[in-house]
Amino acid sequence: MFLECLQVGPLASNCYILADGNEAALVDPGGDSDLILKVIEREELKVKYIFLTHGHSDHIGALKDVKLATNAKIAIHENDAPMLLSAQDNLSIYLGDGFIQPSADIELKGDEKFYVGDLVLEIIHTPGHTQGGISIKSNNVIFTGDTLFAGSIGRTDFPGGSYTELINSIKTKLLPLGDHISILPGHGEQSTINREKHTNPFLK
Ligand SMILES: [Zn+2]
Ligand SMILES: [Zn+2]
């Protein structure tokens, strides 16, 4: 599996490019489309899907450019899909010039499976940071967006946020996946389920 993490946009969001053979998926093209497209070109990848862990502006900022360049299918949970089309809902209006983005091609509900080369990507609905937050598992890694970070958890004070729901998502859907699973969050360093179970102050 090819996996590259790029820090993009003004909030240093992690954009992940994963591929098997020349087939690829993007997770959270939050900004700096030129950086993202450079890797795609360098590795001669055909991007099949763009997965959005949620609809906040720092995770969707490069969506239009990347969609235009790759024609990949945009997948986001149905609860967050309207955020692509509202500068208010995606919070971009509070960070400067508000923007909207192309609409979803695939509205997720959770528990779907997608194939990229021989990789299986499993969608897990993990609400709490937003109502349509998802995590995406493939082999021994999970992309957790702003649900779970190394040593922290996502904010719950934005519209649609719920602290109780977020903790419940993490404890019932992420931690049981197994200690050996690597966590690839939407911001900051990577971690493992084992490390977060034992050291994350929000999960004690
Ligand atoms: Zn967010
Ligand atoms: Zn974020």
Image: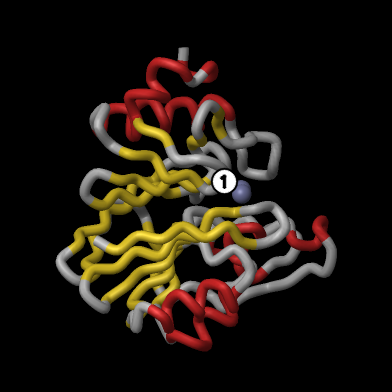
When the figure is inspected, residue 100 is found, relative to residue 155, above or below; the finding is below
Q: Which residue is denoted by mark 1 in the rendering?
A: 187
Say which residue appears at 57% left-offset and 40% top-offset: 129
Residue 159 visible in the current orientation: yes
Q: What x and y, as percent, mark residue 66?
A: 52, 79
Residues packed near mark 1 inside 10 Å, few (<14), some (14 to 19) or many (20 plus)? many
| Res. 131 in view | no
Which residue occupies the foreground of this view, 11 or 63?
Answer: 11
In which quadrant is the N terminus drawn? bottom left
Q: Is residue 13 above or below residue 189?
A: below
Judge from the rendering whether residue 50 lies leftward or rightward of residue 138; answer left or right. right
Q: Position of residue 14 (x, y in %)?
A: 53, 54
Numbered disc 1: secondary structure: loop
Going by the image, does 170 lie left or right of 173? right
The image position of residue 117, as x and y in percent, is 19, 71
Q: Is residue 7 left or right of residue 138?
A: right
In the image, what residue type sits under mark 1?
His
Please say which color scheme the image uses.
secondary structure
For label 1, being within 8 Å of ligand 2 is answered: yes
Q: Quadrant of residue 94?
A: bottom right
Identify the residue at horizontal 36%, vertical 69% (top origin): 25
In the picture shown, does residue 79 fall above or below 194?
below
Residue that sits furthest to the top in the current view: 204
